[in-house]
Amino acid sequence: MSPLASYRRLLGLAGPGYVVVAFLGRLPLAMSQMGTLLLVSATTGEYAAGGLAAGALAVANAVGSPFAGALADRIGQRIVVLVQSVVGALGLAALVALADTGGGDAALVLTAAAAGLFMPQVGPLARVRWRPITRTTGSAQPRLVDAAFSYEGAADEASYVLGPAAIGVIAVLVNPSGALLAAAAVLLVFGSWFALHRTAEAAGGRRRHGAGGPLVTAAFAVLLVAQMLIGVIFGSVQTGTTVLATVAGDAGMAGVVHSMLGVGSVIAGLAVAGLPERIGLERRMLASAAALFVLSTPLLLVDSIPFLIPVIMALGLAVAPYMISNFTLAERVVPPTRMGAAMTLLAGATGIGYAAGSSVAGRLADGGGHTPAFTVTVVAALLALLLSAASGRRLRHAVAVGAHRRLSAQPAIADAG
């Protein structure tokens, strides 16, 4: 089955409306991180404070989302995501109100953390829905699930194109406060719509029926670290881009420039579905990690926005394939009934990495500008390459064990569905 045929069949199974809602529902998380960075940096005049607040939002989301994912495994996604969407939107609005009234650094960081704690991880939860959605497709299901995960990886990257770009445009046309309020509105509408969509009924609420098993194994721990490193890359690139754009006299351009990271990533992510199955996931992970390192090194040479844009776009070609490999490996090695917790844990690890990357890069940038911030990016890419090279055999074995477990658990899961 070709990638195009796979995507068409997935659209037919889920409905095009679902794809639109699930995509728009994930935008607020990307918008809120950049929006918080711009808002707090502008109101306090400190990059470190902006990075700390954005990092606090990401860390709190990383801590809260796995609990939400595990709860969704037990009781279903509908009520969990609905509550998160409403409370998260109110939290972003509160952050804007506090920043506009001159709140102190500590209050801003705590409010950002509170907002992040309740924001739903729509992308990971959407991944959980695809196996139940495709359960009637028989022998075509594995290929369709692979295609779905490729699409989700591309959709995540597209959200990190449009999210920061939208924040940047609104910040230029209105102000950073208006940009973050727009993120809150999108979350309230489309996060709630995602929660109430009919596909939510198929995902979660099956934990007590299906076969269980340990969630955090050695193989899954590798994937958590891998996602943490990609988060460091996101955070440090975003901070370095913000510093360079601000020095150039147009801080609002930071969101637009950073969004270029996702342009090549979206294209590469969609193309991953066409890779032959004989190329193992662990080999894809290694190749994309090597590309991350090679394509990140030119960041150390950039000294202007025009030079930065093509470098960021090229780096994006490796981002989605790396993340798709990680999430698809997790789908293979984690018990089916723990999938919500697994996907949100991976997203949470990305958030922790983003927090570390933005915070460290922000502190280095306060003392040395954009180049030290981008050095964090290159170091993280090198660590991702070393991790992939060292863990290939372990991951390959875990995939084989997971395939046997899934085959054994199929009758129980089918009964629960």
Image (cartoon, rainbow, N blue to C red):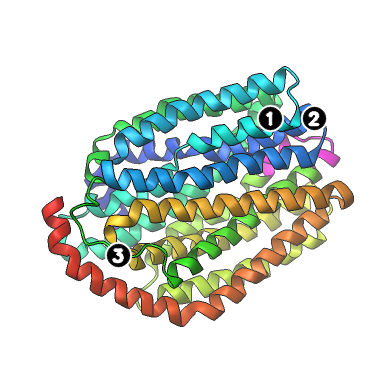
Q: Earlier in the sequence, mark 3 or mark 2?
A: 2
Q: Residue furthest right?
A: 367
Q: Position of residue 24 (x, y in %)?
A: 44, 35
Q: Which mark, residue 44?
A: 2
> Dividing the picture into quarters, in which one does residue 171 lie?
top right
Q: Identify the amino acid type marked 1.
A: Leu
**Number of marks drawn:** 3
Q: Which mark, residue 108?
A: 1
- In what element is the residue under mark 2? helix
Whether residue 247 appears in magenta in the rendering, the answer is yes
Viewer-nearest residue: 252 or 28: 28
Disc 3 designates what residue? Answer: 213
Q: Earlier in the sequence, mark 3 or mark 1?
A: 1
Q: Is residue 361 left or right of residue 7?
A: right
Q: Is residue 218 left or right of residue 52?
A: left
Q: Identify the amino acid type marked 3.
A: Gly
